[in-house]
């Protein structure tokens, strides 16, 4: 197959981790006889520096016209003082909205080899951690009105959290459909004891539940969910939630698996053109030092092959290669156990070597 992939390297560690994902994709193309061509797209701080805009319109169009987009990470302290509309993150939000990718899928799965890096007790890990957070991505407080004004002589800031029924319904359906393909348990997470938007969320979820009789739907308040994720994560199969709750819970969930550096994500809308990115940030403090973990990005590339290009075997090949590399004891800095005696059992590798090892384990 011929596929055109828009590649956004972004800021901080973005370029290094994306480079390793491309090393892996190129090898997949070679083994399986595909042609992947890449279109470079500037977004984030680097686009602000070049064009004075975190996502110029022609860059967005390149993404929309591609078969899918692979993204590293954007942002950094350097752009902390630009106006809110011009922040690197705004480029990312405009990209998500411009591509209409409303459904963000964030898997939380414990790699058995990394159990020692998890802050959770073994007794909790032994019950298994394997769930997916389906996060609404282009609505809610991220996209409501934002303003700062002086009221009664005082600076006053407002951010509006708004959801329409149809926005809730379309992400709700993704939640149910994801659960149907897994263990048929869907937990809808909101804050309906306080927020109107959450009460609407809960009622829409229950209205559409009738159409998915095989799925067991439960409701959970977001504060309780944050607690349950560390208390008993094995209870979850699929979590569906609104944009900001999903942002927060997915960081928490990533940590219990050992490292946020391992977690990929897919974002999809009505077409197969998706956006694939690790869930971690641009980590400017370690940029250029070759210590970043490229696995979250490499696994995002695997998700692209599976969900956008229908290349299941190829995706599995990448996931197997990651498994084998971990199994042989190779660890990037973030997945090294903090205990010195423990860490001596492992082989410390950098970002480049990690990509190369995974490439060499592809079958
Ligand atoms: C994420 C990130 C982004 C978000 C930031 C960089 C805007 O934290 O993808 O989780 O909040 O969505
Ligand atoms: Mg986040």
Image (cartoon, rainbow, N blue to C red):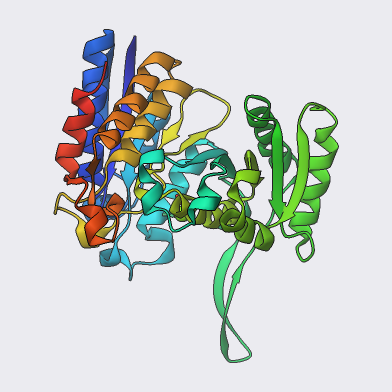
Q: Quadrant of residue 339?
A: bottom left
Is residue 80 left or right of 242 when viewed as pictured?
left
Is residue 91 left or right of 353 when viewed as pictured?
right
Is residue 9 left or right of 280 when viewed as pictured?
left
Image quarter in which the C terminus is found:
top left
Q: Residue at x 34, y 20 (%)?
A: 317
Q: Residue at x 58, y 45 (%)?
A: 135
Q: Nearer the viewer, residue 55 or 127?
A: 127
Q: Residue at x 51, y 48 (%)?
A: 125
Vertical arrangement, residue 298 with respect to residue 225, above or below: above
Q: Quadrant of residue 61?
A: top left
Image quarter in which the N terminus is found:
top left
Res 41 visible: no
Residue 238 in picture, x, y percent from top left: 63, 39
Q: Nearer the viewer, residue 295 or 80?
A: 295
Looking at the image, the residue that sits furthest to the bottom is 153
Vertical arrangement, residue 235 with respect to residue 12, above or below: above
Vertical arrangement, residue 224 with respect to residue 64, above or below: below
Residue 18 in picture, x, y percent from top left: 25, 38
Tally of numbered tags: 0
Res 360 visible: yes
Residue 321 in picture, x, y percent from top left: 29, 26
Is residue 155 left or right of 297 when viewed as pictured?
right
Q: Nearer the viewer, residue 113 or 288?
A: 113
Q: Residue at x 25, y 65 (%)?
A: 78
Residue 50 in picture, x, y percent from top left: 22, 51
């Amino acid at each position: 197959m011929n596929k055109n992939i828009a590649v956004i390297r972004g800021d901080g560690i973005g370029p290094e981790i994306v480079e390793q994902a491309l090393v892996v994709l190129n090898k997949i193309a070679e083994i399986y006889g595909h042609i992947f061509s890449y279109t470079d797209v500037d977004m984030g701080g680097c686009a602000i520096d070049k064009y004075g805009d975190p996502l110029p319109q022609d860059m967005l169009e390149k993404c929309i016209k591609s078969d899918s987009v692979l993204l590293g990470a954007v942002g950094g302290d350097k752009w902390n003082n630009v106006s809110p509309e011009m922040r690197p993150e705004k480029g990312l939000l405009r990209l998500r909205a411009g591509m209409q990718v409303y459904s963000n899928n964030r898997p939380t799965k414990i790699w058995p080899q990394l159990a020692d890096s998890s802050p959770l007790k073994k007794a909790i890990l032994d019950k298994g951690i394997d769930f997916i957070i389906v996060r609404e991505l282009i609505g809610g407080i991220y996209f409501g009105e934002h303003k700062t004004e002086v009221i009664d002589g005082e600076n006053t800031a407002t951010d509006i959290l708004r959801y329409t029924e149809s926005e809730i319904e379309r992400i709700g359906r993704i939640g149910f459909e994801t659960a149907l393909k897994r263990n048929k348990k869907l937990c809808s997470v909101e804050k309906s004891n306080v927020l109107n938007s959450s009460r609407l969320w809960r009622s829409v979820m229950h209205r559409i539940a009738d159409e998915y009789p095989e799925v067991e739907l439960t409701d959970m308040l977001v504060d309780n969910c944050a607690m349950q994720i560390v208390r008993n994560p094995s209870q979850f199969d699929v979590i569906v939630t609104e944009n900001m709750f999903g942002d927060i819970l997915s960081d928490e969930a990533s940590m219990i698996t050992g490292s946020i550096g391992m977690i990929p994500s897919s974002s999809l809308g009505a077409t197969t053109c998706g956006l694939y990115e690790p869930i971690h940030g641009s980590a400017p403090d370690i940029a250029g030092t070759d210590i970043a973990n490229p696995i979250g990005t490499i696994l995002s590339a695997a998700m692209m092959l599976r969900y956008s290009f229908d290349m299941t075997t190829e995706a599995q090949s990448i996931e197997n290669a990651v498994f084998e590399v971990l199994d042989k004891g190779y660890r990037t800095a973030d997945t090294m156990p903090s205990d010195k005696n423990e860490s001596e059992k492992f082989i410390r590798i950098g970002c480049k070597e990690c990509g190369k090892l995974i490439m060499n384990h592809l079958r």
